[in-house]
Amino acid sequence: MKRLIEKGLMFGNLVHIQAPSMVERYNRALEHLAGKRTALTDFHVDISGFSPEIGEELDDPLYLNRNGVNRQFILLTTDQKTAPLLNAKFSTSRSILRSFIEENERQLFALTAQDAVAGELVNSVFSVRDPARLFDIRRVEIEADTTTGTVRAAEQLGQLSDRFLQEEDAWFDDVLIAKMITTAKRTGDVTRNPVRLKTMSFRQENFWTAHFGGLYVFRGVDHPACLAAGPKAALEGLPGEVFSLTQQRNRVARFLEQNGLVEPIVKARGIDAAAILRQKMDFIVVDAAQESGVDLQGATRRDIRALARDHAEALPEEYHALRLLLAWAEDGGRWPRISSDHPAYFYTLRAADHADRDLVNMVLAELSPKDVRQLFICHKELFYRLYSGWGETKKAYVADFLAREYQVDKAGARQALFGHEATMEASPPPPPVPGPWSPRPAQAARPATDDRIAQVGPWGAVLRGRE
């Protein structure tokens, strides 16, 4: 894992905490939540305030996530909103935390200037020893306050202020006035600077959980089901259908298709399908060559292509199926029949344009693990677990590729792979506004693109202007 850490592919984008005042605030919050303190003078934290260094110091990687549910968090700065979430047990946790920080950014900025904000992602379940308890998780709410209770005190001050303004003899109530003054010393003027965090609640219909070997729960679709990465035997008693990702690929494929969750890469709008297929083929070649001892660090596409030619007979079925699909996409070759039980089937798909596309791409990454780029982007927990078992050849190539091709433009890479263009029907062009350059109503319609090119040539306007 050292190679990944050095290239910023593991524990990357964490927030460095080193100021003594920040460390002390963290300790107050940690003691408030878990009754523990750290002796470290500097460390890094993720979006939830979890620190891998402190986890190692305490020998407890779940010190802010007891039982893997109701994750606690410590906010020292609003900069944490862009940090990753480590040791995630639910796929929705990071997006919930980020939404909370962004919705309350001004208030959190003011609060964290003097204290840490500690809180919890609360649901009705405190233990998931029984898998059926996962279906009791319907809504997640956030509870948060500073370690000194500033938010709670501000709410109390607001109530006291209302009493003072509404009660007829409040001017003569010395106890009420004294209580308001004492509370205001902690909160400041709440009329000018309100200290109030928005009450936020998030529905949790479709999600992934790391419990029970990995489980994808789809409840908010037309045909609900659970997709299990681990053994199905541990999931007895779950309501609805449960399909194994490894043993029931046909059923999984049918579930994804029935609910309109996926689309073929070669038919998706707004992407370079041929480039994506070529890269998937390169990854499959590297996977096949990892035991050969070939040094692939820094290898170019030409090197990978030469390796594929030299070892064509040893390449797996996935490679040959994608090669035929690429020939269809580029040269109009024969459409290959790739059924759902074929090893290459899930390599040919991506999530359709819907609210749960990140979750579906996570499912597809698990079903096509040789596509290491999608695996790293969509399912980091599985990527790190599989990486530890790869040969040195594959480790070196993958780390170098991700640092060179993905890290430099993460947003661009995600858009190129998973982005969706709006359809013409969804976004019709606005009607023309009459103006001095508007065409006259009686003007004939413009010829089609091919006809215009035939009349003036592809560069006609420029060349005629020069003539």
Image (cartoon, helix red, strand yellow):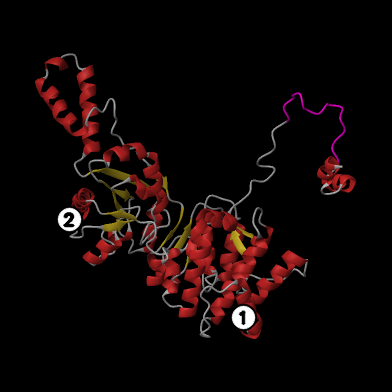
From this view, report whether residue 394 is shown above or below residue 53.
below
What residue is pinned by disc 1? Answer: 307
Neighbours of disc 2 within 10 Å: few (<14), some (14-19), many (20+): few
How many numbered marks are there? 2
Question: In the rendered image, which residue does mark 2 sit on?
Answer: 35
Q: Is residue 442 magenta?
A: yes
Picture quadrant where residue 162 is located? top left
Above or below: residue 86 compared with residue 79 = below
Label 2 sits on a secondary structure element that is: loop
Image-based side of 457 in relation to 174, left or right: right
Amino acid tagged 1: Leu
Reply yes or no: does residue 157 show up in magenta. Answer: no
Q: Main secondary structure of the magenta part?
A: loop
Q: Residue at x 45, y 56 (%)?
A: 207
- Give me the residue at 21% from left, 22% from top: 163
Quadrant showing the N terminus:
bottom left
Residue at screen point 84% across, 45% down = 463
Q: Position of residue 65 (x, y in %)?
A: 29, 58
Kind of element beneath mark 1: helix
User: Which percent across, then down, holds residue 41?
Assistant: 21, 58
Instruction: Judge left or right: residue 310 versus residue 441.
Output: left
Q: Quadrant of the C terminus?
A: top right
What is the crowding at mark 1: few (fewer than 14 residues within 10 Å), some, or many (at least 20)?
some
Q: Nearer the viewer, mark 1 or mark 2?
A: 1
In front: 256, or 90?
A: 90
Residue stretch rendered in magenta on the structure? 432-447
Upstream in sequence: badge 1 or badge 2: 2
